[in-house]
Amino acid sequence: MLSYRHGFHAGNFADVLKHTVLVHILEYMTQKDKPLRIIDTHAGAGVYKLNGPQAQKNREFDNGIGHLWSTEQTPAAIARLVELVRTVNDGKQLQLYPGSPLIAQTLMRPIDRLFLHELHPADFQFLRDCMRDDKRIKVEHEDGFAGLQALLPPPDRRALVLLDPSYEVKSDYQHLIKQLLQAHKRFATGTYAIWYPVVLRQRIDEMELALKKSGIKNIQLMEFGLRADNPEYGMTASGMIVINPPWTLWGAMEETLPWLADNLGDETGEAFYRLEQLVPEK
């Protein structure tokens, strides 16, 4: 299926969590004076126009980056994301929201390499144009799961893999776990960041159980929801599962997640967060 277009959801509460985590990981991993290979399996269009028809249809960004744009006192991790988004907008009015590829391109160094995969034909064209022939970046018109294994292990033994499928069909959940286990077997010391939506909690529970049984160590989960689980509401929450996270990520999320629940939650008071060590480091 190729119906999913992230432009309708760009900059929403789920993007805020995903990209806050991504920025923190990237800035930590690029401190070391060795090349980093960044792999984005489902890259999307690269950048999104918030004044365009897709984003304007439901204006999901209003309760995401739109809210943060005018908020002065925020946790450090949130402030860093907003600073990056302001750079993309040249410090002016909020009109553009960067996807994961543009965030990675902005934060990577000359020695780093970025591999982007996108299967949707229109989004692939936007993505290729967005990257502007950057020699550090390779853009592939394919499902990232198909190309992931060939990119591991990286020559310099340092990699960040972002797994962010659309979950259009329920088999995406199982397929992601299968690909992740294969990738980890090829390169166990890499950092793997998995984004997931909470539409039906059972599917997330199954993912967590599969990871706990996998034998993989050092897995953290961070989740933020606007309301209690209810499949009738669509996506009520989203989360990130990170394997081999930076040691600084936990502390950043201890500050960030409660703030998100307090500031992006609505009048129902159902907003919540989870911060869990799914599997210990040793």
Image (cartoon, grey):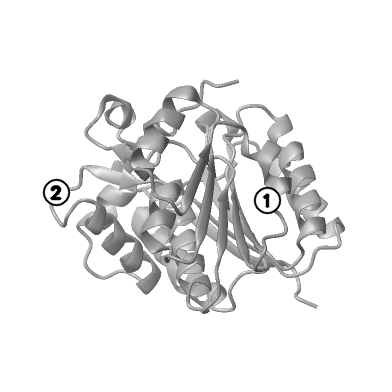
Q: Is residue 51 left or right of residue 137?
A: left
Q: Secondary structure at mark 2?
A: loop
Above or below, 158 relative to 43:
below
Where is residue 50 shown, x and y percent of the image? 26, 37
Q: Amino acid at mark 2?
A: Gln
Q: Is residue 206 left or right of residue 27?
A: right
Q: Choose the circle earlier in sequence order: 2 or 1.
A: 2
**Res 162 visible:** yes
Where is residue 240 shown, x and y percent of the image? 58, 55
Relative depth, front residue between 217 and 184? 184
Residue name at image x 25 percent, y 29 percent: 52
Q: Looking at the rendering, in which quadrant would you find the N terminus?
A: top right
Residue name at image x 53 percent, y 72 percent: 29
Q: Secondary structure at mark 1?
A: helix
| Quarter of the image where one finds residue 48 | top left
Q: Nearer the viewer, mark 2 or mark 1?
A: 1
- Tell how many labels: 2
Per the image, the residue denoted by label 1 is 151
Where is residue 68 shown, x and y percent of the image? 28, 56
Above or below, 45 relative to 151:
above
Q: Is residue 125 left or right of residue 160?
A: left
In the picture as drawn, the residue positioned furthest to the left comes out as 92
Per the image, the residue denoted by label 2 is 93
Q: Which mark is residue 227?
A: none
Disc 2: CA contacts within 10 A as few (<14), some (14-19) or many (>=20): few
| Quarter of the image where one finds residue 103 | bottom left
Where is residue 121 shown, x and y percent of the image? 48, 23
